[in-house]
Amino acid sequence: MDSDLYRDITDFAHDNPSWLQHLVELWTEVGLVLFGVLFVVCWWRARRAGSTAMALALLAPLATAAAYVSSEVIKSLVDEERPCRAVKGAATSLITCPANGDWSFPSNHATIAGGAAVALALAWPRIWALTVPMALLMAFSRVYVGVHYPHDVAVGLLLGTAVAFFFAKAGTRPVRSLVESMRAGGNGAALWLTGPGAPLHARR
């Protein structure tokens, strides 16, 4: 059933104009870079926010990294072959099929995208309207270019979301205490990293 959906999506991709194919191929890699840019923007704006906001901003890339590690662990246990080699009669993948031993389940890209979307939304609530569509598009693009099954990306999104959410929630209190200590200490490097925090009138 999943192989049939994979064939449908890859056939759809081949029916699209070349400019759209190239755009999706570009997004499947550049999207991760854009998440990285958002991490930096989130951290920068949190420098003049409360300690909880800064803690979540610092945790966002770490939570996403934890999600990625979890997907790598599962990959090493499941050893699912890539659909671009395993599905008979499917259209040729738009990008080079990953080498043997680079397993398919779950999708690292989808896991990272799901984790980043949630971690950023926790630190910067209004950004969810951007990060969630970005993550969904990233997941779809991995099937579109032919290197993942739909279930690979669906599980990747769920895994990234769950791991990043619990990692960020578990780390908020200790990292918030660290941020408050660094801000109170007045050390130049520490203040540059954490920022001065919210103005006094905004803390009331």
Image (tube, rainbow, N blue to C red):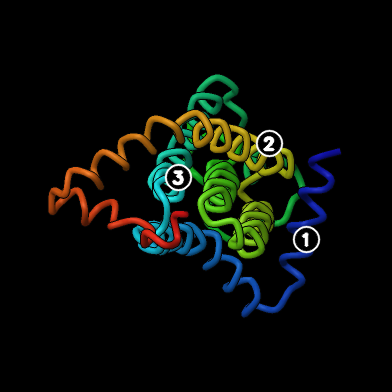
Q: Position of residue 23 (x, y in %)?
A: 58, 73
Q: Quadrant of residue 180?
A: top left
Q: Is residue 189 left or right of residue 141?
A: left
Q: Say what amino acid the circle numbered 2 marks.
A: Val
Front position in the image: 148 or 125: 125
Position in image of residue 8 (x %, y %): 82, 55
Front position in the image: 143 or 14: 143
State the residue position of label 3: 52
Left or right of 25 in this view: 40: left
Nearer to us of marks 3 and 2 is 3
Judge whether 34 appears above or below 111 on screen.
below
Q: Return the residue at label 1.
A: 11
Foreground label between 3 and 1: 3
Q: Is residue 93 visible?
A: no
The answer to which of marks 3 and 2 sits earlier in the sequence is 3
Element class at badge 3: helix
Between disc 1 and disc 2, the foreground one is: 2
Which quadrant holds the N terminus? Answer: top right
Residue at 15% across / 51% down in the picture?
A: 189
The residue to which callout 2 is attached is 155
Mark-to-mark CA distance, 3 and 1:
47 Å
Q: Residues within 10 Å of mark 2 (few under 14, many from 20)?
A: some
Amino acid on which the number 1 mark rests in the picture: Asp
Q: Which mark is residue 186?
A: none
User: Separation of disc 1 and disc 2 at Cα?
Assistant: 23 Å
Instruction: Name the element at disc 1.
Output: helix
Please state which of residues 152 and 10 is positioned toward the viewer in this rendering. 152
Q: Amino acid at mark 3?
A: Thr
* Circle 1 crowding by C-alpha within 10 Å: few under 14, some 14–19, many from 20: some
In primary-sequence order, the first of circles 1 and 2 is: 1
Disc 3 packing (10 Å; few <14; some 14–19; many ≥20): some
